[in-house]
């Protein structure tokens, strides 16, 4: 009986800890779909390192935009990239970034940056990496056309 009570107390403590941790997590911004494309936290960490090394000068580390660029966080990401396949985003990063040294990132590095962008936009990480394969990435988009339209309607009402 004593071991059952100890187990129950431990289980309750774990549930309380998880609930507290979940409550502390930032809220998902309106319009962000939470059914995430596959990526891992390790992949996003690799992307974060690349952003700090190659992208933060223009996009800042928070990706909220810098010198005349398109914001890659919150609603800005969805406004510009919501219905565009992730392969287009990865290819754009690979071939045009950094602006002072384009075509220096590999497709894997560009895909890792996309994973970081997803992480910064509250898309939950999973157990599979985002593939460094343009055909596969071109089958993934962040919103349906209907969700994209709803976002613009909601923004117009503000």
Image (spheres, rainbow, N blue to C red):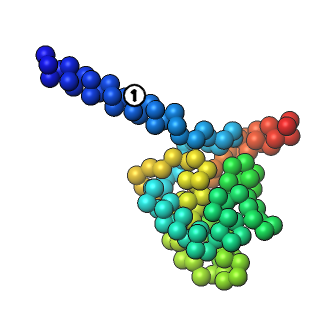
Circle 1 is placed at which residue position? 16
Identify which residue is drawn at 48% across, 62% down. Answer: 45
Identify which residue is drawn at 29% across, 27% down. Answer: 11
Number of callouts: 1
Can I make out residue 104 in this image? yes
Place residue 9 in its image quadrant.
top left
Left or right placement of residue 31 versus residue 139 in this view: right
Identify which residue is drawn at 53% across, 40% down. Answer: 25
Classify mark 1: helix, strand or loop: helix
Place residue 151 in its image quadrant.
top right
Residue 98 position in % (x across, y down): 66, 76
Residue 129 position in % (x across, y down): 45, 59
Identify which residue is drawn at 69% across, 39% down. Answer: 30
Left or right placement of residue 56 versus residue 42 in this view: right
Q: Is residue 123 above or below residue 3?
A: below
Residue 83 position in % (x across, y down): 70, 52
Q: Is residue 80 above or below residue 18?
A: below
Left or right placement of residue 80 versus residue 23 in this view: right
Residue 128 position in % (x across, y down): 42, 55
């Amino acid at each position: 009986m004593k071991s059952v009570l100890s187990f129950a107390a431990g289980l309750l403590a774990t549930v309380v800890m998880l609930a507290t941790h979940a409550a502390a997590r930032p809220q998902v911004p309106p319009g962000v779909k939470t059914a995430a494309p596959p990526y891992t936290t390790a992949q996003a960490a690799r992307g974060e390192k690349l952003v700090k090394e190659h992208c933060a000068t223009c996009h800042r580390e928070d990706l909220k935009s810098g010198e005349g660029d398109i914001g890659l966080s919150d609603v800005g990401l969805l406004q510009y990239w919501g219905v565009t396949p992730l392969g287009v985003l990865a290819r754009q990063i690979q071939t045009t970034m950094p602006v002072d040294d384009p075509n220096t990132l590999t497709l894997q590095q560009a895909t890792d940056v996309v994973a970081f962008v997803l992480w910064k936009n509250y898309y939950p990480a999973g157990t599979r990496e985002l593939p460094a394969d343009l055909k596969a990435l071109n089958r993934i988009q962040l919103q349906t056309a209907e969700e994209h339209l709803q976002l613009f309607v909601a923004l117009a009402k503000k």
